[in-house]
Image (cartoon, rainbow, N blue to C red):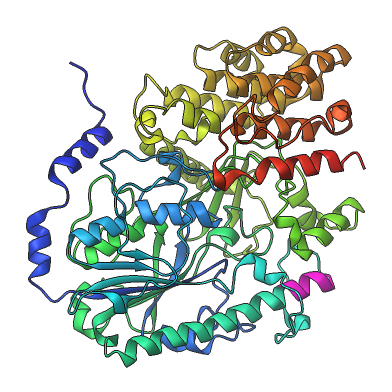
Amino acid sequence: MKTLHPALLLVLLSVVAGLDRDTVRAADSKARPNILWLTTEDIGPQLGCYGDKYADTPNLDRFAQRSVRYRHAWSNAPVCAPARTTIITGLYPPSTGAEHMRSQVRLPAALRLYPQHLRDAGYYCSNNSKEDYNLEKTGKVWDDSSNKAHWKNRAPGQPFFAVFNYLITHESQIRSKNHKLVHDPAKARIPAYHPDTPEVRHDWAQYYDNITTMDGMFAKSLAELAAAGLADDTIVFFYGDHGSGMPRSKRWPYNSGLHVPLLVHIPEKFKHLRPADYVSGGTSDRLVSFVDLAPTLLSLIGVKAPETFQGHAFLGEFAAAPQPFIYGFRGRMDERYDLVRSVRDERYVYIRNYMPHLPYGQHISYMFETPTTTVWKKLFDAGKLNAAQSTFWKPKAPEELYDLQSDPDEVSNLAGSPAHTTVLERLREAQRGLARKIRDVGFLPEGEIHSRAQDSSAYEVGHDDAKYPFQRVFDTAELASSLQPDATPALLKAVGDTDSAVRYWGAMGLLMRGSEAVNTARADLRKALADAAPPVRITAARALATHGNAEDLGQALPVLEALAPLGKNDVYTSVLALNAIDALGDKAASLRGRFSNAGKAEAKVPARMQTYVPRLLESLNGAAN
């Protein structure tokens, strides 16, 4: 008889047992807190209470004086949809296949979202603005999720959990027109990675203006709670959904993209739910992240979280011991593919780039609407930036290590420093350890996350070695992206593996190593042009077209031309092929103007992804002008 993987066994047990009903009944017998989440978009800890002298946030600063301020809080994902997906599930999206921006995956039926657990315990759950989850909801999740949702709509005497989200700080509001600056741009602090130009200073000043506006909205929300006589009965959280909306913060799993403000106020009435490090007006150095929020919510209402949750409660009856690390990730960002993992302790941040051949600053159309992005790239192209400012536009190092004490802007990579070898190895192993523990399915090409899970879910695929030989795939991705020059023989062997994801990473490793590896592997890569798996064909074609000879280019371009059109291919194949064609530049000039978005209906493009092929076509065809 086949033994079930422990994680799947826990899923089945949760179906049978659900939450501990005795625990729920015990919680019902006590006074239970209301819980209010006041959240905002696209800000780092740029608040007065976090020591930022440029910020003007009097209401949040006063709130911090009677709350605990977490100094090391991370969002896990540096962009909204996967960040919210982390929160709603209590799971790392790389374990569920939901890491890619605006993707849509299924969860196993047994895995329920945190509002469902709260509603089981008798809570009225409302969400006033924005869901944006990368997964399909099953069953009723919220009592109300709309712009009319409010804790006031609950039954008399019913405890509530409510979310109100402020949109004014979103990235798009940095570039809103006709804004009259309040903050003096001359006084803005410009990070070391940004050029000091009028456009950059204006964007930073407008960002801070928006935070001040949000601070006023926050005050109104608290006043409404107090006017209802509920302030003493309500635990209040304030946090941002990921780092600032400025480029190289948002979308990047550095500390700059993941570090968020987190303030929590637990009234005196519920002081028994405060952890040992809770001091009103004080700070906590505990490492916390969004994956911890769901178990923390349940702990605050006296319910032990399901074992399937991957985070750790940091407040309440079932608070866990502090954790030594917190983790971040990056997958596809809109129309551009990437794969990055990160981890930090109290002092250091480690970044692992699994696609180091790609530049940090790939052309993401939405990001380029921010004036800072445009002027920054223009200055790079003109050769007018220093080393720290230029890095964003160049290919990545496989590994990065930053000391946040001496280098808060994360521009001095210590990965090659002999003095930091022990730190590097410790954080590297922590990152690998999490990937193994959660069975990270992000190492599958996105299309295969879906194709392998046709009759189940990516989470279940991840825990089934027959469908996803994780260790073999992961080891090949590690080797491929290490850029070790002596790895070519092993990568050639991988190109002939029985699993398509291993073959994909074998071809990726050859692509990353350039002309010498491609010349050595020419016969194998040409054979891979007929591989059964589209991601393998596309990667082999890109390697041959980029680094091979004229004959290689002639064989590779027809493969990319066949795999790019929507309708004939699914959206994941089309996006991957168009990225490859775009990267080839003038070598693929003959393919410009050949493709359109006309096949989106036949390709069954998810509604949330329908802008990505048009953006790539605009970039590709614009190169001809």
Between 427 and 439, the residue placed more toward the observer is 439
Image height check: is 536 above or below 461? above
Secondary structure predominantly adopted by residues drawn in magenta? helix
Question: Residue at 17% across / 79% down in the picture?
Answer: 157
Question: Residue at 33% across / 92% down in the picture?
Answer: 227
* Quadrant in which residue 46 is drawn: bottom right
Q: Which residues are magenta?
A: 197-203
The picture places residue 533, in percent across and down from the top left corner, at 58, 18
Q: Is residue 351 something that shows in the picture? A: no
Question: Residue at 76% across / 25% down in the picture?
Answer: 514
Is-magenta flag for residue 202? yes
Q: Quadrant of the N terminus?
A: top left
The picture places residue 103, in percent across and down from the top left corner, at 52, 43
Name the side, left or right, on which 34 lies relative to 145: left
The picture places residue 463, in percent across and down from the top left corner, at 34, 30
Image height check: is 489 above or below 230? above
Image height check: is 556 above or below 237? above
Q: Is residue 173 something that shows in the picture? A: yes
Between 219 and 568, the residue placed more toward the observer is 568
Name the side, left or right, on which 32 lies relative to 433: left
Name the side, left or right, on which 415 lies relative to 90: right
